[in-house]
Amino acid sequence: MSIAESDSTANELRIVEDATCTFCGCVCDDIKLSVKGHEIVKAKNACVLGNAWFLNHEIEDRPACFVDGQPATVEQGIERAANILANARYPLTYGLSDTTTESQRVAVSISDWIGGIVDTTTSVCHGPSGMAFQGVGEVTASLGEVRNRGDLIIFWGSNPAESHPRHFAKYSLMPKGMFLPNGRKDRTCVIVDVRKTKSAKAADILLQIKPRRDFEALWALRCLARGIELDPQQVLDDTGIELSVWQDLMDRMKAAKFGVIFFGMGLTMTRGKHANSEALLALTRDMNQHTRFVCKPNRGHGNVTGADNVVSWRTGYPFGVNLTRGYPRFNPGEYTASDVLARGEADAAMIIASDPMANFSQPAREHLKSIPYVALDPKETPTTRNAAVAFSVATYGINVPGTVYRMDDVPIPLRPAFESPFPSDLEVLTGIERRVRELKGIQA
């Protein structure tokens, strides 16, 4: 191809139909991308967060790998990374929420071969929900069912107007469904939160409860669902909401044809944590004695739900799994990354698609900085800057195909816009796994 032909191809406008946005857990797969060369110039149907995700994406001019801060080949990086992990006594693998399920599967395999800990970003967001699912179970549905059937939508400790801007319009409130032909007019929206968020504008009913009293509020509703008499003054003191208001909500919940509760970190990361999630899951189960009711966590990262799924089907547990004895053990607080690092226990680490150096506690960050670790990320971060081996990788969904899981556990395929000069997470992790097995003498 001549230089003129190459320039013509680079400037040619291409359209990528049904691209998937991997910014948040909605994983919208109806995005129409207009691409010129290595630049996305338009992202039709994307929300404000999706637009920023696509339109601000650029290929950085830097080496694909750094070893001890110096440019190196990918092969040299894989060799050093494999040696760090294979020779470690208590290695940690962390992150995984912003990469494909194919890469997540290989990362778990590496943790298994080296006898280490595998943890995901779930442990610092919806980890309490993962614990509650095991203790109580989950009455669930797809977002498609919510769109077509949900006539009472409750958001508890969740602010989708800012965290998931298309949630209202695409799944929960606005769309006309098979059994809800009038869309928003056929639905009632209830928001329960400790403050008036931007989502409150969409609410038909706003219940502003006392901070750190979600557990009490949920158990009050459980009592009302079972017809147990409550002391009005005690309920008011505990929740900040009068009993008559909770009774009105319960009457609406019982009268709904298909009720849905979406809950966020406002519930899971406040006082009570997994006990809050257990109370909400139990309330949803109780409601099914009266009508059809489901609940779902509003997940943040594009494939954090996929990370939970992959780690679960490979180990039996969703996060914080210790594989050092050759079989999986699960104990949040002991085997979760922030705790392992803060106690100074890990002697090596592999950080994939996350930035703990920017958001973990000071003791955890200091220990991570003191040990050799491998980092894979599309961009430079505080974590990659301090890594013994740092790989610059292609961005999933924009440069890399594969599979991700929507927040309702539905797998969605990726349709990349253009190729990247950097390797994918999957290519790097596959190379590390192969070399680790060679160093450990593990036969294929």
Image (cartoon, rainbow, N blue to C red):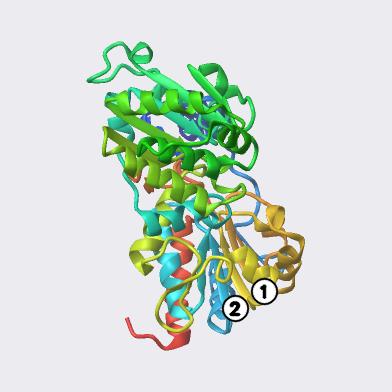
- In this rendering, is residue 225 above or below 389? above
- Whichever of labels 2 and 1 marks the residue nearer the N terminus, that label is 2
Q: Which residue is mark 2?
A: 84
Amino acid type, callout 2:
Ile
Question: In front: 56, or 196?
Answer: 196
Question: In front: 323, or 430?
Answer: 323
- How far across and down, in percent of the image, does residue 289 sit? 26, 39
Q: CA distance from mark 2 to mark 1?
A: 7 Å
Q: Which residue is mark 1?
A: 372
Amino acid type, callout 1:
Pro
Q: Could you tell me if the residues under marks 2 and 1 are in contact, i.e. CB atoms within 8 Å?
A: yes
- In this rendering, is residue 231 above or below 362? above
Q: Name which residue lies at 44% across and 29% down.
A: 154
Instruction: Tell me if residue 7 can be seen.
Output: yes
Question: In front: 414, or 5?
Answer: 414
Q: Mark 1: few, some, or many residues within 10 Å (few <14, many ≥20)? A: many
- In this rendering, is residue 75 above or below 304? below
Question: In front: 218, or 48?
Answer: 218
Q: Where the N terminus falls, by quadrant?
A: top left
Q: Name which residue lies at 71% across and 65% down.
A: 364
Quadrant of residue 91 within the rendered picture: bottom right
Quadrant of residue 295 within the rendered picture: top left
> SS class of the residue under badge 2?
helix
Q: Mark 2: few, some, or many residues within 10 Å (few <14, many ≥20)? A: many
Q: Where the C terminus falls, by quadrant?
A: bottom left
Q: Name which residue lies at 43% across and 76% down.
A: 112
Name the side, left or right, on which 94 lies relative to 418. right
- How far across and down, in percent of the image, does residue 432 sit? 48, 71
